[in-house]
Image (cartoon, grey):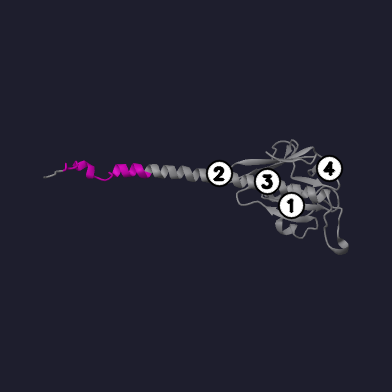
Amino acid sequence: MLFTFPRLPASSKKGFTLVELLISFGIVGLVTGIALFNHTEFGDSIRLSNLTYTMALQIREAQVSGSSVRQLGLGGSANFSAAYGIHFFTSGGNNRGYIFFADIDNDGRYDGSESESGCASSPECVAYFSLPQGFAVDEFCAETICSTDAGGPTIDELNIIYKRPSPSALIKSHQPALYDYGFITLTSPQGRSRTIRVASTGQVSVQ
């Protein structure tokens, strides 16, 4: 018995046309671009959140150091009564650093150098923190008076201090007044922002 099979149409043997390949590559490129964009945006958001919570924890560390007993110095020069705090500043246009300090003279301010190299030799400087590339302290505020206010009163520093035995915060600028709360706003390379709110009651929150 003889079996015969129908021949396939000639068109079914063809591959992709140039137009079909271009459309396919275009779709793949579009999907890849969207995925990379979303990955960059997600990574930027995660890094900003991590940085903000790290800063909030460092403020908490100052609170614990100031409201308890932390030794500053060694031997006969050891100091157990110093208050501790975090110092934010705008000097020299530097908005990528802040300082963990010991308020040795109890004046409610950081009195040492605000440069990273100078901080190391300043008696009140405990640690200097630099923000990663692209991240910055966009502004800081003592209640409604901010470092970036235009045409009104501004502040060029913000000190958040904790003094034994109270866990409450002393919030001061370069002025002698005490404030009820302060804000520190961080920005990311992609323009996102997160804010830390510190209340004089001792509460530290991330917004």
Point 29% across, 44% down: residue: 18
Point 51% across, 43% down: residue: 38
Q: Are marks 4 and 1 in contact (CB under 8 Å)?
A: no
| Label 2 environment density (alpha carbons within 10 Å; few <14, some 14–19, many ≥20) | few
Disc 3 target residue? 53
Q: Earlier in the sequence, mark 1 or mark 2?
A: 2
Specify the quadrant that holds the C terminus: top right
* Distance of label 2 from label 3 (alpha carbons): 17 Å
Amino acid type at mark 2: Phe
Disc 2 target residue? 42
* Distance of label 3 from label 4 (alpha carbons): 29 Å
Amino acid type at mark 3: Tyr
Counting from the top left corner in percent of width and height, residue 37 is at: 50, 44
Disc 4 target residue? 176
| Label 4 environment density (alpha carbons within 10 Å; few <14, some 14–19, many ≥20) | few
Residue 82 counted in the magenta span: no
Element class at badge 3: helix
| In this rendering, the label closer to the viewer, 3 or 4 | 3
Q: Are marks 3 and 4 in contact (CB under 8 Å)?
A: no
On screen, 104 above or below 151? below
Point 84% across, 62% down: residue: 74
Q: Are marks 2 and 4 in contact (CB under 8 Å)?
A: no
